[in-house]
Amino acid sequence: MHATYDTPHLNAAVGVFALLANPVSVKMILAIRDIEVSANHLADIVDLPVDQTSHELHRLESAGIVSRQRRESGDFYLLNGVHAGALAEVAIFHAEHQQAGTHSCGFSHLELATELTEEASCPVFPD
């Protein structure tokens, strides 16, 4: 699949970027890429107040980026798929290269995104 400028999903993609424009969202997405956590535990991980963490989790859940699993011991949150985590990670790599004054890490950002999604067993870019 190759996204083009005339995709019918443009507005939804912009919505994801809008959520990722918040440093708290990116921090939380990167923190829960591989784990399922409670709001209290995530608040400890990202060093934020529980009420702010819960509010941000609600925003991410409403956007379909995270899902909530209800258990006897409370609510637990996890990423819905790997796309938001991979997108956040690519953005961090891009920022690192911009700050370092380099424009390339030896391969293209498409190759990086493909590598990140393949690591998570996601067929985003099928042959």
Image: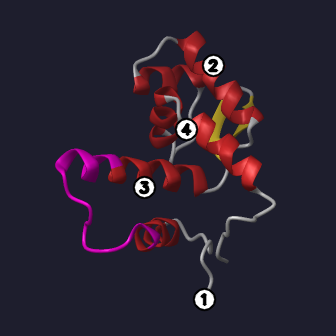
**Quadrant of the rendered image containing residue 14:** top right
Q: Nearer the viewer, mark 1 or mark 2?
A: 1
Judge whether residue 70 can be spotted in this image. Answer: yes
Q: Earlier in the sequence, mark 4 or mark 3?
A: 4
Question: Looking at the image, is 106 positioned above or below residue 30?
Answer: below
> In what element is the residue under mark 2?
helix
Q: Are marks 2 and 4 in contact (CB under 8 Å)?
A: no
CB contact under 8 Å: marks 3 and 2: no
Amino acid type indicated by mark 4: Leu
Q: Using the numbered discs, state the Cα–Cα distance from disc 4 to disc 1 in whole angstroms.
A: 28 Å
The type of residue carrying mark 2 is Ser
Q: Position of residue 89 (x, y in %)?
A: 43, 51
* Residue corresponding to mark 2: 54
Alpha carbon distance from label 2 to label 4 = 17 Å
The magenta segment: 95-110
Return the residue at label 1: 127
Lower position in the chain sequence, tag 3 or tag 2: 2
**Figure check: 29 above or below 39:** below
Q: Nearer the viewer, residue 74 or 14?
A: 14
Q: Which mark is residue 33?
A: none
Is 104 magenta? The answer is: yes
Q: Which residue lies most toward the front here?
A: 5
The amino acid sitting under disc 1 is Asp
Q: Which of label 3 and label 2 is nearer to you?
A: 3
Nearer-N-terminus badge (4/1) = 4
Report crowding for label 2: few under 14, some 14 to 19, many 20 or more residues within 10 A (C-alpha): some
Marking on residue 90:
3
**Residue with the mark numbered 4:** 20
